[in-house]
Image (cartoon, rainbow, N blue to C red):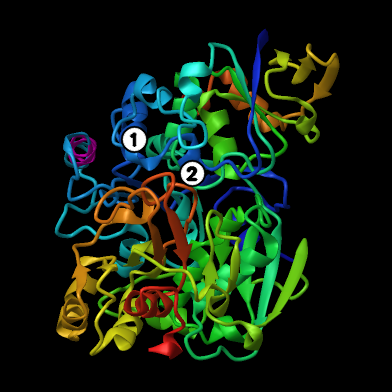
Amino acid sequence: MAYTITEKILLAHTNKKSIAPGDFIYAKIDMALGNDITAPIAIKEFESTGTKNVFDRKKIALVPDHFTPAKDKKSADQAKILQRFAIKHRIENYFEVGEMGIEHALLPEKGLVGPGDLIIGADSHTCTYGALGAFSTGVGSTDLAAGFINGHVWLKVPETIKFVYHGKLGKWVSGKDLILHTIGDIGVDGALYKAMELTGEVIRSLCMDDRLAMCNMAIEAGGKSGIIEPDEITRRYIRGEGRRVKGEFYKSDKDAKYCEIREYDVKKIEPQVSAPHLPSNAGPVTKFKSIKIDQSVIGSCTNGRISDLRIAAKVLKGKKKDPRVRLIIIPATQKIYLQAIKEGLAEVFLKAGGVFSTPSCGPCLGGHLGILAKGERAIATTNRNFRGRMGHPDSEVYLSNPAVAAASAVKGRIAHPEEI
Amino acid sequence: MKIKGKAWKFGNDVNTDEIIPARFLNTHDPKELGAHCMEDIDADFSKKVSKGDIIVGGKNFGCGSSREHAQISIKGAGVSCVIAQSFARIFYRNAINVGLSIFEIKDAQGISQDDYLEVDLDKGVVVDLSENKSYKAQPLPKFIQEIIKTGGLLKWVKKRKRG
């Protein structure tokens, strides 16, 4: 029988001889992830069942990244629950502030997730790791608690939509623009319950950071997962920088069944901007050039990686941000932070009048480090622009890639990087 | 079991940031989360809603984040169940796992704000008593019914572990 890569990974994590979309399976987990917002509930539920031990202390990752370093007393209490649980159960992959980074940048960087893995995370952007050729999906705290108990998760085998990207990317166009354009095309429920398999020569030439940014936003189209077949770029990544990840390199069969195939000619795609209040309100940046901004945020699990910071620095080098604009740049992990300092990117950001902060999810979900006041407007390299997402319910978020966010900070309005 | 309550209508793509804004996620106390339920769409929702009332959404209800605080908040506000034309997948599985009753009804837009509804939780039949109209929810897959019957995911897992 012919299978997609998603079906092959799921099948390999069950005792079944065959599977098909629509089947319910009880699958083995390779990594179960929680953060300072979702894990406290999972821990409470785990403890309420009277279970003494977790299924595998090496296959759990706890990352206090959302409201940390603790923004207030209640957040400190939440983070403390993680720390206590991690110590009690000797959780190998617990990352205290100072080692911590944004979970979806940190886990791939540390080599904790790899090709062929099945990963669940109590965070909707867990779909990020599909970029490595893994099946990875967001679940709730109760699923996480159940995973802690016996290392399994119930899943409905999804149908797959295949997205094929042809042509050559224009200057300043990145993985982020492709995914915003795609969400704009199919809508915020266009891939509801489905796996999004991203393919084509454009994907094959994308660097890992851009692949991670694309799979990260599968959830914004309602997708269960995003996935890219692993290749030489994947192999180099999982063996690079001290990582020693072993993985199964699955590929979709030629005659695998897809519920839909969509093709894009990327030559026609300009840098994208998604207007409030849905990620699907995407269009070319030039359409939004009259929109003034109060804040520009560069960071998050979507675009806080080193290549994102490099491109932002390229735009900002020798420039000053508009005096009315707050420019907030948040590297996704400590390693990226240090690398940005070594490469002189931090200096570029500070000289441009930006803030360069410690890793955190920060303002992306309206937590801290840059909350919007009533009537304010931000451009952000984050993943959601829902009403009130970054602060006051009457504030606005426009989504873009890092080059556009950097250019907009300089101009004080949404701008194309070519304008700088 | 049958429940009765007033319908509170919402549109398409109601997201979890609207159900419970992230600024309240530094706690998981049901009462506290319930007091801010739907706050960014309707600031007074938690004050106006009565125990047993029913949320009626459009398409893709509960899209966005995986926060189970959304279900805790809805239950904390006293809402008895959620009806929608379709649900976002993480919201859907969280509701099943924690025992918040949800019903997928493709023509739910026929229900109006303030209509008085009677819901048969077991059969998935919704009667709009104000408009004398009946709706039938998409039946839940057998696998999911089993989780619900056992009393939620954790009980199901414990039972399975023993068995």
Q: Secondary structure at mark 2?
A: loop
Which residues make up the magenta segment? A75-83
Task: Say above or below: B8 vs A31.
Answer: above
Check the residue under mark 2 and report the chain it is in.
A
Q: What residue sits right under mark 1 in the picture?
A: B24
Q: Quadrant of the C terminus of chain A?
A: bottom left
Give the residue pinned by disc 2: A139
Decide: few, some or many residues near mark 1? Use Cα within 10 Å; few <14, some 14-19, many ≥20: some
Query: Residue B152: x and y, percent?
Result: 53, 24
Instruction: Identify which residue, B86 or B55, lies in the foreground.
Output: B55
Q: Circle 2: is it few (<14), some (14-19), or many (20+) Cα within 10 Å?
A: many
Asked if the residue at tag 2 contacts the one at tag 1, i.e. Cβ–Cβ closer than 8 Å, the answer is no
Say if B54 sits above or below A185 in the image.
above
Residue A82 on the magenta span: yes
Indicate which label's residue lies in the foreground, 1 or 2.
Answer: 1
Among the 4 quarters of the image, the one containing residue A301: bottom left
Query: Which chain letter matches label 1?
Result: B
Residue A251 percent location from the top left of the image: 61, 73
Regarding mark 1 in the picture, which secondary structure is present there?
A: helix
Amino acid type, label 2: Val
Identify which residue, B146 or A340, lies in the foreground: A340
Q: Can I make out residue A251 in this image?
A: no
Q: List x then y, in percent, for residue B80.
A: 58, 17
Name the dominant secondary structure of the magenta segment: helix
Q: Is residue A377 visible?
A: yes
Query: Where does residue A291 sit, x and y in percent of width and height?
Result: 47, 69
| Identity of the residue drawn at 43% across and 78% down | A404
Please tell me in which quadrant of the rendered image residue A410 appears: bottom left
Vertical side of A382 occupied by B66: above or below: above
Nearer the observer, B38 or B62: B38
Task: Identify residue type, mark 1.
Answer: Phe
Q: Is residue B113 magenta?
A: no
